Image (cartoon, rainbow, N blue to C red):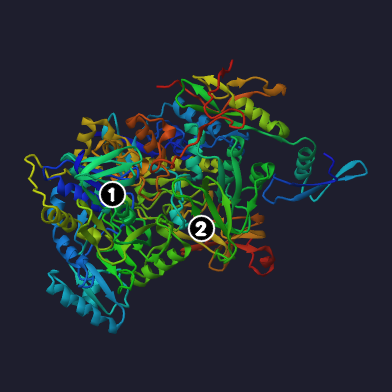
Amino acid sequence: MKSLNVDIAVIGAGSAGLGAAIEAKKQGMDVLILERNDELGGITLQCIHNGFGLKIFKEDLTGPEYIQRFIDEAKELKIPYKLDTMVIEITEDKEIYAVNKKEGLLRIKAKAIILSMGCREKTRGSINIPGFRPAGMYTAGQAQRFVNIEGYIPGKTFVILGSGDIGMIMARRLTWLGCEVKAVVEIKSYVSGLIRNQVQCLEDYNIPLILNHTITKIHGKDRVEGITISSVDQNWDQIVGSDEYIECDSILLSVGLVPENELTTKAGAELSANGGPVVDNNLETTIDGVFACGNVLQVHDLVDNVSEEAKRAGKNAAIYIKERSDKGQIKKDLIKIVPGINVGYVKPDYVNFSNLENLLHFHLRVKEPDRDVIIVIKEVNKIVYQRVRSFVIPSEMIEVRTKFKPEVISPNCRELKIEILPVSLLEVIDEVE
Amino acid sequence: MDYDVIIIGGGITGCCIARTLSRYDLKICLLEKEADIASGTTKANSGIIHAGYAADRKYLKRKFCIHGNKLFDLAHKELNFPFKRTGTLVVALEERQIKDLVYKRNYGTEDGVPGLEIIIDKNRIKRMEPQLTDKVIAVLHAPSGGIVSPYELTFALAENAHMNGVEFFREHEVIGINKIVAGFEIETKPKKFTSRIVINASGLFAAEVSRMAGADTFEIYPRRGEYILFDKDIIHLNKVLFPMPTRLSKGILASPTIHGHVFIGPNADNILDIEDISTTTRGLKEIISGGVMLVPNLPLNTAIRNFAGLRAVSNTMDFIIEATEMVGFVNVAGILSPGLTSTFAIAEEVVRILIEDLGEELKEKEKYNPYRPKPEHLSDFTKMKLNQKIKENQAWGRIICRCETIPEAEIVDAIHRPVGATTVDGVKFRCRAGMGRCQGGFCMPRVMEILSRELDIPYKEVTKRGKGSHYLVNKVLCIKLTEDSKESEEVAEK
Amino acid sequence: MSEDKKIIRCIVCPTGCEITAENVDGEVKFTGFGCKRGEEYAKEEFSAPQRIITATMRVENGFLPIIPVRTEKPIPKESVFDIIRKISSIKVKAPIKVGEILIKNIHDLGINVIASRDMPLKT
């Protein structure tokens, strides 16, 4: 069995993996990227629409254009990578087992590992849609792969379940290809994705957006023939008698993404409720020297944010090697970050006490949309951070960047709660200068 | 005559009969209507090997089950399909149900079911199955019960039958049967066959096929059962868990699968449409409440699939295994639960019918080989072995199905085996590519590519399960402008 | 278009103000916007709506059978399907570099269609 030693092994060469690898290399580390696909770039390669890079490059790029910049930089920096290589195991001792055709089974011993495996799509089975199981049902990403990489149209008349950005983008793409998109069906009472996409993908083409509905039966034995949709109440329960049949030969499911952490759990790292690994503010998981970034940690909406997160992970992995990797497991002094009112989840799960004065990056998603709110971080009843925001919605990840002056957090603080409150409560909250 | 024996139906019953008869000096073929064997009732079978105490003593199926159960050990050694005697528990949640458990234990033991015991010690029950509800009062434990993969068993039977000379014709739907001198002429959509003996094992269509041959002696009614399959490694069950049975079925179970998943189901709905394998909102709710009754911690948000199948129930509620007035035409119909467990016993009975009722002199083949080697699985390899295998055959080094860790080599094997896969589902059911939590989201295009390459068919023509189940429609062109087949001519000047 | 009133949803920020464009005595008046950027967007969207087109073109001899492409700049909304038809009817030869002009001055609009990624030769 071929054995290799590297400073940093990066798993996945998508926007997260490439971003982390580039930064780690710039920090003088010896890096190896392991990628299962036959080229670098990850899922961004199939996102041929524009809207990428507005933050980082101040340009409006398509997905492939965006990621090409990182691919080019990785190649310029001569970062070694292996394609068609699948990691099948990571051990707690940071040994990676991967396979490819040419080299067989590889054992890679790394001083640090960066997990950037991305995420996968929720399926029909995971949301229990009843009915037949014909050909013609795809997840949005699967259809996107056929259409944008393989070059095939997977149907003629479509219904899309889920009004997230990917669902709406595919509605437009399919319409541009000459298919008929009969409707986008959304279980919530509001559109899941950006208004920009609602206007430019659905309204531009008169594609009906049917809110408060879901698919309650799939028809067709060998190939999809149609769907039944029903309206739902606020608890997402079907309203009896509200069934409507829509004839179609294809269904696209855009019903959610799940971080892909099989390797992470098998390695023994803890996962948090959002499906990503538990991390501290350095993006280090519960295994020393194993870091995570990108969709494997938390599902992002903007690839620009993935690249920023990845850069931090690459940098921190390098620091870990320079300062800690030969010291064995250290005990960290951690403060737990707890999601409070209207916060679905927050990353990181912990902040190192000693890092409180560094710039901390929090990412969170709200449970319910709201207007005129304050984002508040509290230590028990004492507010240590607050910031007003005019609009929050679950589909838009919220970033909070802050530092804490030493006297602000008490020395025996074990927990900080982050919550989203109505601005009208401002008067009654204890303010802290 | 083209053949000595033609078997109609490629489910587990037909394939087991084929394999059993392949031991003898007979020219045999099997006709299957769908694109693959194990496409009908077998595919949605719960995969439980029953101990045999459940059916009423008046039914044939009881003795076939008890006897068939015992035949699984030898079959497992010979055919190498996934199988495990986990033991089964019938769960009583009320005192008054214990009486029924006692009857089952007593009669079962009398009839040869081994090891039956009633357990009322809650601690022992919980040690046996920690996930079982705390409301349990008593259980009937049957250590001879177990779990199997019903379609992998069917493939193993078919492959072994093929190795021993049986021909398989898939996508050959029987549309007519005519009695001719010394036998039958069978009309299928593609062509005609002749045979001295015909064995009707066509499941849901058995009554229809029997009528084609002129034997109108029974009726088959479809009874639908729905299931939900959960992701593996979330919850683990040691035993197959049964509730107290209902009039229509053994009830809604919670069971481990041989590959480490957990499922709940089936319910039991008498329906009219013999092709309605759809799941329903009401049905899924029903099996969830049944499942949760047995396993309160069922991880409902980790479901990965729901599906349904149809039991072929005869008007006698029992197996119909008999020679008919049309000499040479044998019915093997109404094989509902415990049909899977009974399969080897049923095949033995068919042999007896051939010998005693049809006067056949069955001579054993010299070169009969009952052994079908176990397909190789990467998940069984040590690291050293995997490395070695990749050096011998690079296709072991390209992982196609990420969720189940299935390499290209296993997919190629699934295609090129005897009676191999020709569709995406065929690959899926043989080597599990696409059965994991992403349900083919990642691997499906790659599986299609491999099918296209290995079978030399255009990518666009690869289907899910045969004619009519195509995935792809056109190559990416603006189809408003151009026709399907027109390639773009103009090459851009750059 | 002879509509007196048109509703435009602003896409500049997540608030999504509903802006009304109304024909008042021959002049178009905009109401309902929440900020200057919204007002500017509404004016443009009303008089000359534009869109960026992203599509794919067939590739000869490439690593992949199709290459993602885009219009370098937004094109008039009413020409969307004409542009797509044109893009779809042309094949390009590999190798291609990101940013390379694949169709010059499409539809005489003075706008090029460029490659969104590198496309090396088939291996």
Residue A98 drawn at (x, y percent): 30, 38
Q: Residue at x 83, y 43 (%)?
A: C3
Write down the chain letter for disc 2: A
Q: Residue at x 30, y 45 (%)?
A: B32
Q: Is residue B283 left or right of residue B80?
A: right
Q: Residue furthest bottom?
A: B96
Instruction: Give the amino acid type for the residue marked by disc 2 in the picture.
Output: Tyr
Q: Quarter of the image for the N terminus of chain C: give it.
A: top right
Residue A74 drawn at (x, y percent): 45, 29
Instruction: Give the amino acid type for the residue marked by disc 1 in the picture.
Output: Gly
Q: Observer-nearest residue: A191 or B23?
A: B23
Give neighbour class at mark 2: few <14, some 14-19, many 20+ (Cα, 10 Å). many
Q: Observer-nearest residue: B454 or B137?
A: B454
Measure the C-alpha gap from mark 1 to mark 2. 53 Å
Q: Quarter of the image for the C terminus of chain C: give it.
A: top left
Which residue matches tag 2? A345
Residue A327 drawn at (x, y percent): 31, 46
Image quadrant in which you'd find residue B387: top left
- The answer to whether one can see residue A352 in this image is no
Q: Residue at x 53, y 30 (%)?
A: B484
Same chain for mark 1 and mark 2? The answer is: no
Which residue matches tag 1? B9
Q: Is residue C84 left or right of residue B218?
A: right
From the viewer's perspective, is residue A79 above or below residue B294?
A: above
Q: Is residue A406 left or right of residue C40?
A: left
SS category of the residue bearing label 1: loop
Q: Observer-nearest residue: A284 or B209?
A: B209
Write down the chain letter for disc 1: B
- The answer to whether one can see residue C92 in this image is yes
Residue A278 drawn at (x, y percent): 42, 54
